[in-house]
Image (cartoon, rainbow, N blue to C red):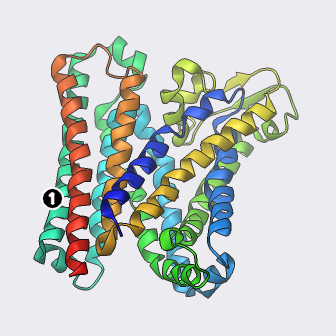
Amino acid sequence: MNPLIGVVYHWLGGLASASFYIPYRGVKSWSWETYWLVGGFFSWIIAPMGLASLLVPDLWSVIAAAPSKVLWLAYFFGLMWGIGGLTFGLTMRYLGIALGMAVALGFCAAFGTLVPPMFEDGKFAELLAHASGRTILAGVAACLAGIGVSGMAGMSKERELSPEQKAATVKEFNFGKGMLVATFSGIMSSCFAFGLAAGKPIGELAKASLLTHGGSDLWQNLPVLVVVLWGGFTTNFIWCVILNLKNRSGAEYLNLRRTAVAEVSAAEGVMLSNAAEETSVRDSSAASHGGQAGPSTHTGPAPLLRNYFFSAIAGVTWYLQFFFYSMGETKMGKYGFSSWTLHMASIIIFSTLWGIMLKEWKGTSKRTHLLIGLGLAVLVGSTMIVGWGNYLGAQSAGH
């Protein structure tokens, strides 16, 4: 148990989460639902099951031995998280990457960190009673403060940019509408943390199997991810297939025709398109969401091998966020639930940096830039405070 190493793992997870959309820049002539589902097979099925099978002995025996209620709850919260993910891209559409992620993940961080211990007998009281617990809560507060500063930067940006400048970076910038969607998305997305908490008995079974076979308990949470991500896959699979049927884009998987009419509608595709607009993840219609924009036409056969390759890389990169998360959580000690704050803060840090690199803040004042820098500094500090609180907890447990 080493909470400071755990913080590093969470930073790596945050970097993976903030960067996974980059490989999608190489995808050509595919509708959003096509490349999202292909990438999703790697994100939610192939990578989690493959790595868990390699690293956890008797993986399927471990999952089969878990109580049915535990499996169902982990799966159910995965379903709910999937709904949050499908609305997440709307925040990117209306707020942009930096501000959209900050607000949505802020709600996600607060609910995902504080709700689980409230449902454990005496856990929240224990937090308040010990210096380590109070330090962790201070870190959570610092994380929320950093998110608030990032929101202030977004409001400052809204006041400073002309309509033309806003459209050049985030074509449908709408602060009020974006905040409403971000709130819903953030709360629903926090269900992933609830799924991890519900799946703890699976992790304990995996830990016993690992130790029996001489393995490392570093991998004990990988089977939990398998079950939770089944739920997330179900939500996304149903939605993408509906879009494939509605938009007649299912033929794209095999290049069965040269022209595909695609009406982009699911949420995450908006994030990908906004992030990679200058490098054309796909044509300009990828910025639409929910079928609001008219259909676009892609002519010519898609480069299948290239598209499958980049979608697979994006999908595996997405999964790596929780691969590192699961490793980091094993290092956090009795306050492992605080991993959620570390994960969210890390994602916001790296997504803000990507927003800067993608010039979303170009044309804003020094005041806005200072707010961006202050928000980043506070978020980085929050991860260190949470890590220190877990370190204090580990020290007290050792005495």
Residue 126 figure quarter = bottom left
Reply above or below: 289 against 8: above
As rendered, which of 336 and 271 lies closer to the eye?
Answer: 336
Q: Residues within 10 Å of mark 1 (few under 14, many from 20)?
A: some
Residue 300 position in % (x across, y down): 81, 21
Residue 361 figure quarter = top left
Considering the image in quadrants, where does the N terminus appear? Answer: bottom left
Q: Is residue 16 visible?
A: yes
Pointer 1: what residue? Answer: 138
Residue 167 figure quarter = top left
Question: Mark 1 belongs to which amino acid?
Answer: Ala
Residue 271 position in % (x across, y down): 49, 35
Considering the image in quadrants, where does the C terminus appear? Answer: bottom left
Q: Residue at x 70, y 46 (%)?
A: 38
Horizontal relation, residue 241 to residue 115: left or right: right
Q: Is residue 180 visible?
A: no
Residue 92 position in % (x across, y down): 42, 35
Reply above or below: 200 against 178: below
Residue 350 position in % (x across, y down): 38, 38
Horizontal relation, residue 373 to residue 354: left or right: left
Q: Residue at x 80, y 34 (%)?
A: 305
Horizontal relation, residue 215 to residue 308: left or right: left
Q: Secondary structure at mark 1?
A: helix
As rendered, which of 165 and 199 lies closer to the eye?
Answer: 199
As rendered, which of 110 and 370 lies closer to the eye?
Answer: 370
